[in-house]
Amino acid sequence: MARGYMGKMLWVDLSGGKLKDEKLDEKLARRYIGGYGIGARVLFDRMKAGADPLGPENILGFTTGPLTGTPALSGTRYTVVGKSPLTGGWGDANSGGWFGAFLKFSGYDAVFFKGIAEKPVYLFIDNGRAELKDASRLWGEDTYATEDMIKAEHGKDTVIACIGPGGEKMSRIAAIVHLKGSVAARSGLGTVMGSKRLKAVAVKGNMKVPVADEKGLKETRARYLATMGGHVDILRKYGTTFTTVPSIESGDSPVKNWDGVAVKDFPDASPIGAEAVAERSQKRIACYQCPVGCEAIMKAGNGEYKWEAGSYRPEYETIVMLGSNCLNNNIESIIKANDVCNRLGIDTISAGAVIAFAMECYEKGIITRKDTGGIELTWGNHKAVVALTEQIGRREGIGDILADGVKIAAQKIGKGAEECAMHVGGQEVPAHNPIATPALTATYLTNATPARHTQGSEEHHNPGLLPEFNQSLYSGRGEAHARGSNFQHALMCSGYCLFVNSAFPTADVIADFIRPVTGWDVTTDDLVETGERIENMRQAFNLREGIKISQFKLAGRLLGKPPQQAGPTAGVTVDEATLVKDYLKAMGWDEKTGKPSRKRMEELGLGDVAKELKL
C-alpha cells in the first residue's frame, strides 16, 4: 500500500451489528485519492440505484485523504459521503478539526455504514479495535453533552463526530458536529446518520501515518511556510468574518432572501462585521497541523442572549445567512443561533435560508401568526431568528415543517411558497451571489452536489492554473471552469484545506506534498485529470438515480431576472445558459442530460461505469 494511507477501511453493518476490516486497494487510492473520490466509487459499486436516502440500503461513509494526519500543511480534512436526503442524489460534506487525523491514527482511512441499528449506537475505535456501543443514554442529548459524555467514558484523547436532536429527528438539514463547532454541514448527511440510529463515531489512537520521504516532506513544509502569504494575517485575526461587510456591500451576500439590495434594505453591515465578532471572541484555535488557525471560540454571552464560553465563532456564511438574509443586524442573536445550530446539529446555511424563506412567506401572508404559534416573523426580528432556529432543530411548532429545508417546506405550505424557496435541486443556496460572481452559476447548476460554493470554478486563487479567458464575456470560460473545478476536487479529496491552499502563489502545493507523502510521481496536471475522474464518478451516481443537470434551476432573483435596480450589481443579468453550455462542452457532457461521452469515460478508466449507464 502506498504511504499516506493506513491501508484499511472498516465496514459496519448496523442491522446485524457486524464489523469487518477491508484492505484499501492501492489502485483505488491512486485513481480517486481519498475523500469523496474514493467515496463516490465505493458507493456507486456497492449501492443499488433508487435506495431510500433514509433507508437501510443507503451507505454512509467517513473518509480521509492521503495528506490527512500528516505534517503536510493543513492536512486536516475529512469528508462524509452518502445519498443526500435533500437532493436524492450524490451527497458529501467536508469538515476540518481533528477528527480526520485521528480516524487515521486509530488505524483506518475510511469507515462505511450500512443498515439501521435496532437501537441507538455509536462506533468506538481504539488503535484498530472497533466496536459498536449502546448509545441509548446519549440519544436526545445535544452534541456538546454527547461529546462530554463519550470523553468521560473513553478519555479526553477521544475525538468525536456526532449528531444532535436535529439528526435524531431526521431534519433533512441536519449536520454532523465535531469539537462542538467544526461541522460537516451540507447535503443533510446528519439526517442519514440519525436514520441509522448512529449517534456518534468516536476514535482514538496513536498510530503514525506512514510517509514515503520524511525528510522531503519536512523540507517541503518549511519551503511553503516561508512563502505563505495572501490573506493569512487577516484570516488569523478574523477568520472568514473579515469578508462579511465587503461581501454585503459588493452584492455578493444574500439580502432579504436574495430579493433585496444592501444599499436600500441593509445599508449598514458594520453591526455584524468582523470587529463586532472579534470583540466578543476569546481566543484563536486551529485545526490539526494548520499554521493559520482561522477559527476562534467566544467569550460567554452575558447580554440578552446567553451562550457558554468556548462556543465557536460563527463563519461568514452563518453570519450573513442568519443576518443580512433575514435583515437581522443583531450580532449576538447570530452568535446564539449559531450555538443552537451547533448544539442541535443543524446546517447554519440551510437554517438561515429556511428562516428567510419563512419570513418572506409571512410578509406575503402565505403563513400567518397562527401558523407560527405567535412568533412574529417580520424582517429583522432577531428574537424570531433565534426562536425559529431552536424550533427547527427540535422539530417543534412550525419548525417541524421547516426542518426539511425550503423545497419540502414550500411543497407542504403551498399557496405560492415555492416562489420564496431559494434552492437548487433541493439544496439551499449558499451565501455567494451568482450576479456578483457569475462563475458560481455553472458551479451551482452543474455540480453533482448543486448549490455548493466550495466546488471550484474559474475564479481560482492560484495563478498559472487556468487557461486565459476574457472575464468580461460569458462565453469562452468553460475550459477554465472545468480545469479549476477538477483541480479543486483533487484538492478536497487529498485532505488538504481550501483556505490554506489560497495562501500560496502556485497550485503545485498539493502535488508537492502528495509526492513525499505517498511516493507517487504526480504533477498538478495529473491531479486535474484525477479530479475530472472524480467528478465524472459523482455525476454517474446522479445519472443512475435519474437526475439530469437540466433539472437544476436557479431562481430568477439569483440571476438578475429582472435585474436589480440599485447597488453594485444593478442592471446585471447573468447568461446562465452560455456559462453552463460552455462548461458541459469542456467536460464532454451532453448539454441536456449531463451524460459524459463514452469515449472520455473510457479514457478516464471508467469504461465499466459507461457500460452500466449505457452511454
Image: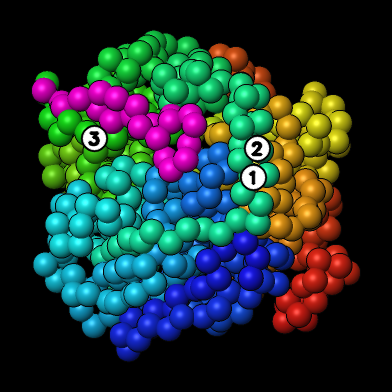
Indicate the position of residue 549 as horizontal and vertical percent values.
Answer: 67, 58
Marks 3/1: CA distance?
39 Å
Marks 2/1: CA distance?
6 Å
Marks 3/2: CA distance?
36 Å
Occupied quadrant, residue 103: bottom left
Q: As rendered, which of 221 and 186 lies closer to the eye?
A: 221
Name the residue that disc number 3 marks: 311
Indicate the position of residue 39 as horizontal and vertical percent values.
Answer: 56, 67
Name the amino acid, label 2.
Answer: Glu
Q: In this picture, which residue range is highlighted in magenta? A: 282-302
Question: Which numbered marker is on residue 428?
Answer: none
Which residue is pictured at 84% across the width and 27% down the height?
470
Name the residue that disc number 2 marks: 219
Name the amino acid, label 3.
Answer: Ser
> Does the CB distance between marks 2 and 1 fall below 8 Å?
yes
Name the residue that disc number 1 marks: 215
Q: As rendered, which of 123 and 58 lies closer to the eye?
A: 123
- For the view shown, which residue lies furthest in the front direction? 215
Occupied quadrant, residue 561: top right
Name the amino acid, label 1.
Answer: Lys
